[in-house]
Amino acid sequence: MRKIHYILLGMKYTLFALLILFASLLIITNIYKFDIFDFSIYGATTLGLFFLFYYFDKIIWAVESRPRTGSESMPGKEGIAITDINNEGEVRVEGIIWHARSYNGKIINKGERVIVEGVEGIILIVRKI
């Protein structure tokens, strides 16, 4: 998970704690002059915030789990070196030919299987499997 997810999750629980504190203060301060109108306002607010908190995780998950495409989806995928990679060469990953650079500077021979470690621009950083 990304760092932003943890920040937003912390905000969720902080807001939830503040909601409980706010509701407690309203109940304590209005305990002697309770009105049905106040009850409906507090109930609607609490119910609305409950649903907000309930769906908060689902909204964050939907935003963060968007499908990755192009070069950002490449790390971890396997391919085959179609040229000798003496620091630089070419690989075929999922049927597409990419410029590639060796991850640790070692020579990768033509036909060897590689795994993508990262991406720099349009160049894949690969290592031999």
Image (cartoon, rainbow, N blue to C red):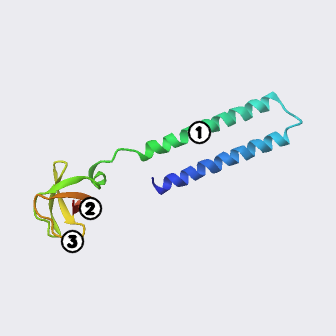
Image coords of residue 23 (percent x, y): 75, 41
Image coords of residue 83 (percent x, y): 10, 61
> Mark 3 — residue?
105
Disc marking residue 121: 2
Q: CA distance from mark 1 to mark 2?
A: 39 Å
Image quadrant where residue 39 sits:
top right
Kind of residue indicated by mark 3: Gly
Q: Residue at x 54, y 51 (%)?
A: 8
* Circle 2: element type: loop
> Mark 1 — residue?
52
Q: Residue at x 49, y 41 (%)?
A: 59
Q: CA distance from mark 3 to mark 1?
A: 51 Å
Q: Is residue 102 above or below residue 72?
A: below
Q: CA distance from mark 3 to mark 2?
A: 18 Å
Q: Is residue 52 above or below residue 89?
A: above
Q: Residue at x 15, y 55 (%)?
A: 80
Q: Are marks 1 and 2 in contact (CB under 8 Å)?
A: no
Q: Earlier in the sequence, mark 3 or mark 1?
A: 1
Kind of residue indicated by mark 1: Leu
